[in-house]
Image: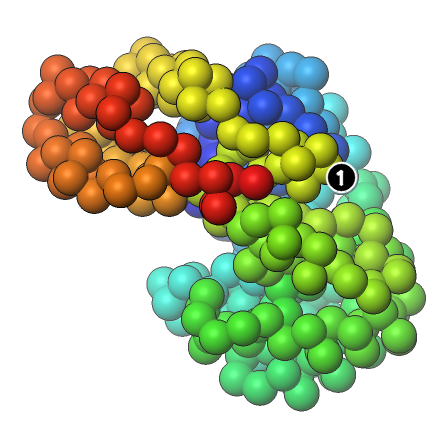
Amino acid sequence: MEGITGYIYRNAHARYFGGIDKYFTPFIMPNQNRCMNTKELNDVLPEHNKGMEIVPQILTNKAEDFINAAEKLKELGYSEVNLNLGCPSRTVVSKGKGAGFLEYPDRLERFLNSIFESSGLKISVKTRLGMYEPEEFNRLLEIFNKFPLSELIIHPRVQTDYYKNKPVLESYRKAEESSENILCYNGDVFTRQDYEAAVSGFTRTNAVMMGRGLLRNPNLVHNIRQGAQTDKKILKAFHDEIYEGYREILPGEKPVLFKMKELWTYMLVSFSDAEKCWKKIKKADRLTAYELAVTELFAEKDIDKSKCI
């Protein structure tokens, strides 16, 4: 996810939790002047992603920009890239990118023709059902079926849902019936029970992508696979590695505080009765105050087992 799951987070997650088959990077936004900026390049450098299977995401509606970015990633040693058609952010959608590109299926088909003709990499697609109505996905699925995607990742909401309302599982079932591509499910997998409910009956689904659920509970994969509870000591070590990683690469205290507070908007869900500690974390304007608040949280609050198993 943009701004959170960069290489600092991914390396810490792989070290303390793991269990992930593929990590997808936050999206790269190429343009006519450059394939990627310094931050994006740092995030995909092989030396920052050792021992992990990484798939870079590209977010654009211009075929030439996609092709140029894919070529640079190929030079770095990547064999697969992902086209992001799922981002619902207004700033992205207003430019006809991410989920905003789904409003123009004919343009999207021409775009896919161009990138599949020119790119030597495997290409997967992450998509929503459309912009406004789930029925839009019928036409989109026809388009996707024309191309040899390495994987079709479906978040069964429309753009205007953002993350509200429930995923439209009936639309996902239609994809299972008629998709020509390998399928991956994405959307509202926060617990083991969510996972079991979401994939029940999906016989052709090859994988599940986790976003917000994994940010809330970094141990979610092991909760699902083995019923393993989240260990607070491991969670603390995971937090500390991310924190120190940001302190090493970010200029000053405020950027570090911003990053860590953003992470806590998700991870706080793992704890029971932690609102007072959260207020102290939010109020912290120096790293010393932040460290005290986090130490208090881990010392005094317990993992909420109902959300972490």
Q: Residues within 10 Å of mark 1 (few under 14, many from 20)?
A: some
Indicate the amino acid at tag 1.
Glu
> Is 182 situated left or right of 82 in this image?
right
> Is 76 situated left or right of 257 in this image?
right
Judging depth in this view, the residue of 253 and 110 nearest the camera is 253
Establish if 79 lies above or below 187.
above
Residue annotated with mark 1: 80
Could you say where residue 101 lies in the image, as x and y percent from the top left?
Answer: 57, 70
Judging depth in this view, the residue of 16 and 4 nearest the camera is 16
Look at the image and tell me whether residue 11 can be seen. Answer: no
* Residue occupying the point 82% across, 57% down: 205
Could you say where residue 133 lies in the image, as x and y percent from the top left?
Answer: 58, 86
Look at the image and tell me whether residue 128 can be seen. Answer: yes
* Screen quadrant of the C terminus: top right
Establish if 236 lies above or below 54.
above
* Residue occupying the point 25% across, 25% down: 300
> Is 144 situated left or right of 28 in this image?
right
